[in-house]
Image: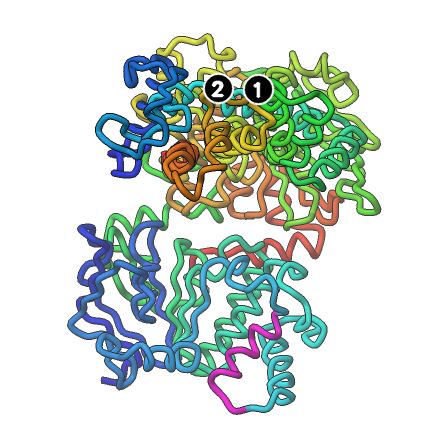
Amino acid sequence: MSALLEVRDLSVRFGDSRVVAGVDFEIEPGECLAIVGESGSGKSVTARSILGLAGTGARVQASVLRFDTTNLLDASPRRLRGLRGREIGFVSQGALVALDPLLPVGREVADTLRIHTSLTPRQRQTRVVELLAEAGVPEPGLRAAQRPDELSGGLRQRAVIASAVAMRPRLLIADEPTTALDTTVQAGILELLDRLRADGTAILLISHDLAVVSRLASRIAVMEQGRIVETGATAQVLQAPRHPYTRRLIAAVPTDRPRGSRLTVAPVAPAVEVPHDVVLEARGLVRRFGSRTAADDVSFTLERGRTLGVVGESGSGKTTVARLVLGLEHPDAGDVRLLGEPWSSARERDRRVRRPRIGAIYQDALSSFDPRLTVGQILADALSGGRSRRADVSELLLQVGLDPSLARRRPRFLSGGQQQRVAIARAIAPRPDILVCDEPVSSLDVSVQAQVLDLLDDLQRSHGLSYLFITHDLGVVRHMSDDVLVMRDGRVLESGATETVFSAPRQDYTRALIDAAPRIG
Amino acid sequence: MRRFRPVEVFAIVVIALLVIAAVVPGALAPGDPLAIHPLESFRPPSFAHLFGTDESGRDIYTRIVHGTGASLLIGLTATAIGVGLALVFGLLAGLGPRWLDFGTTRFLEVLFAFPGLLLALLFIVIYGPGVVTSTIAVGLATAPGYARIIRSQVLVVRRAPYLEAATVLGRSRTSRIIHHLLPNVSGSLFVLVTLGIGQSIVWASSLSYLGLGAVPPAAEWGAMLSAGRTYITSFWWMTFFPGLFIVLSAVVATMLGRSLQQRLRSS
């Protein structure tokens, strides 16, 4: 009975649907247990029911739900409030929304201290600065006075962690603490959590990403449809997974998977022979916004049937490059040539007739669809401005691995992976030569991401498509691209064949990025 | 589609009755709204005269039913004028160059500085009272509100990623505006319009009440309200029933708007 947290036969129901069923686990001090699964597997609900925050309408049952000596099931709301923040810290999913936009972040951290301690305001202030510094926030005194919108995503997440660990809780629950953060920032957060663990904090880590988890967790519980299907020591689960679902999750991680290998078990599409002409050429692109230079002397070429990866952290100018290439922004200097002809210097009227040659998919597929239209209408519109036959739409849906019956649905009722497939179907409808993919899998679960990446790979082979593939994820870029462009502050830092750049990076920054990429093992 | 809630059923039934009254008033009240029966003046509500009679012995129920067309038509036309003007201003401001947006927005703000009814009164002072001018006046007075909403909707939709996606697919500016921007702006506009009809009916009736719109003996609700004003202490039914119908029609139009809003949001 040395476990700090013990959960036996936990189940949670919302109305008639059971989202968590018969979950058992325990965590000891100084140990990190990771619960891994896809969205909807019930992992977040599990974490939240420990805190008594499963949500309205949730019916939580368990034979044991014990934290230290407290039975959490019977505990009064008052007792639970006392535990939350003081004994159990919680780092929630979106650091972008977990902070009050009107409060300086220092106040947010100070609030925890105000509620649970009797420190004077001056002592609190000192402590807040200490905590922020400890969470790796540079210039903590200055940052404490800033509001969340003045901080980057990484700093905000650090502030959330600082407030969660302010009372030195014995258990820290972290729900997707690094999702949506840049790779190097993610590495820093994971290090911070690991330091807390080494100091004796028990950590319950919730994530869909096995690679993230493998850095931190000593044990892994794999959750599928509300049940834990496999549990064991991290090394054992990762190297000798017993359950097929675990194997699928592991196979889906693109990091260190060579170009052309499959992330899912599905037959490979036959390849078409394509000529190796240059389809896209950028020369000395410069784009300034006020005093900021978003793209500075960016040049590259893209051949037919190949993929050029553009990798960099947020603010590095990747998206500006995508918009320049798509002819949505006009370069201040330099030019883009499409299929050997002037593109960025052409007039929009002339460009419009050539636009079907170059398509785009985005990170947020849903917002790229007209909300009034059904999937079928969206695709019909992309095919020929609405005059296409229903059979063409079905054919398109089949090509991206969707059931033609989805044509009648509206995109917002589809899953994230399905939405991105519809976006891909729309992009390939005019039979383009080039697809610009701007973070197309960044908001998808790893296993869904794997399916979408494989789909893109298949389409490239069967249609001879060229991709300009923009991402912050080094694992994805390495898996997808033939050549790679590393960007920082609007400049191309390094470029070359992907394997060369990854195995022998010439720049320190590239090396740091590669080292920071989470990988299994 | 979800099932109808009781309030929605109520609103739909009332609206159906109002529409019947407006189109074929004779079906609901066979009498003549203008027929005078001096011997039966000031009768309280009874089975013979459901809502009583007025100072000339005219049946108030008949007059209300026959006045529905005028009142609703004024409300609808005024809203149409208001939304039509607002569309022009809103689209100019939302889609035009920056100087045009600036000019239009400042102009709308000047109009906003005056209460709507005052604006309508000003228009009537210039062009003289009457049903037509008061309808136009109400339309003019409501336009700035709609225009501002349309402008902000246009600005939101204009920057929406799906418009950019349409650009990437090679759609022209005109095609993007017609196929994506206008339908998405008008979706929310439709709801506002149903909400606005109620308001327009009240305003048009207010103008008639002030003697600036329809004038007695025309069977228009606002005018009837005004005519009954002199007798309000002794013969309450002369003002109560026209007033009730003004409120009722405004309320059901608003209820319909609200439920449409909720349905659009959840579908």
Residue shown at the point (26%, 63%) measured from the top left: A231
Along the line of sight, which residue is nearer the eye, A351 or A193? A351
Q: Where is residue A437 in the image (x, y as percent from the top left)?
A: 56, 33
The image's mark for residue B131 is 1
Is residue A398 at least partly visible in the picture? no
What's the magenta region? A105-118
Q: State how the image is colored.
A: rainbow
- Magenta part, dominant SS: helix
Residue shown at the point (19%, 59%) measured from the top left: A21
Residue shown at the point (57%, 58%) measured from the top left: A516
Above or below — where is A89 with respect to A289? below
Above or below — where is A475 with respect to A430? below
> What amino acid does circle 2 point to?
Ala
- Badge 1 marks a residue whose secondary structure is helix
Is residue A82 at least partly visible in the picture? yes
Above or below — where is A474 with respect to B242? below
